[in-house]
Image: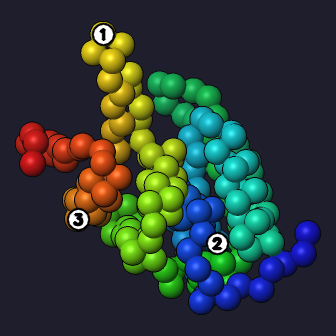
Amino acid sequence: MVSIPITPQGPMTIDKAWLMGMIAGDGCVSQRSVLICAGQDRSLAIECRRVTASIYGRAGRVYSQPQQGPHPGVTWMFCVNSTEICRDLRRLACFGSSSWTIPKDVLSSNMRIVGAWISGLADDDGHDRIEIRKHRRCLTIASVNQASLAQVRDLLARLGVRCAIYTSRGRE
């Protein structure tokens, strides 16, 4: 695989928006590596590897970790070690459970980019529920980051999706 030079001035792409949504959902970006927890869905970790290779020319690796506790199984992880990739991603957004932000390039982009970012967030940190009797679908995204959830609500409104933010105290 050929490494693609990482140029920070490149436009936001659908793949990059999706990857950044995944990182916001359950990932981290350090100085040297990107780590994404894909839960029990191996295909998500493999898709992270494919997308990272298409954007940066570096595939990273997919591996599993045993889960402890009341629900034994495996958790699938994706990791890529590259200071250049980390620098590029951290230039675009802040990552961390209570401090993640939606990239400005996503906020000002077209609906396809916005949808890709939300899709990445929902793929990694969302829970889908279908209410058959009411013919409704419900997506829940949990986060301690209230400010960024408000931004997600605003992005969903741009897409024509109704939503509400709930706290442990009830609806906001």
Mark 3 secondary-structure assignment? helix
Depth check: give the residue in front, 163 or 59: 163
Badge 3 amino acid: Ala
**At 54% from the left edge and 34% from the top edge, which residue is drawn?**
68
Judge from the rendering whether residue 47 lies leftward or rightward of residue 95; answer left or right.
right
**Disc 1 secondary structure class:** loop
Q: Amino acid at mark 1?
A: Arg
- Of tags 2 and 3, the one toward the viewer is 3
Whichever of labels 2 and 3 marks the residue nearer the N terminus, that label is 2
Q: Nearer the viewer, mark 3 or mark 1?
A: 1
Task: Kindly tell me whether residue 117 is visible in this rendering.
Answer: no
Task: Give the residue type that dot 2 points to.
Answer: Ser
> Circle 3 sits on which residue?
147
Q: Is residue 18 visible?
A: yes
Q: Is residue 151 left or right of residue 49?
A: left
The residue carrying mark 1 is 133
Say if 166 sits above or below 11 in the image.
above
Disc 2 designates what residue? 33
Q: Quadrant of residue 8?
A: bottom right
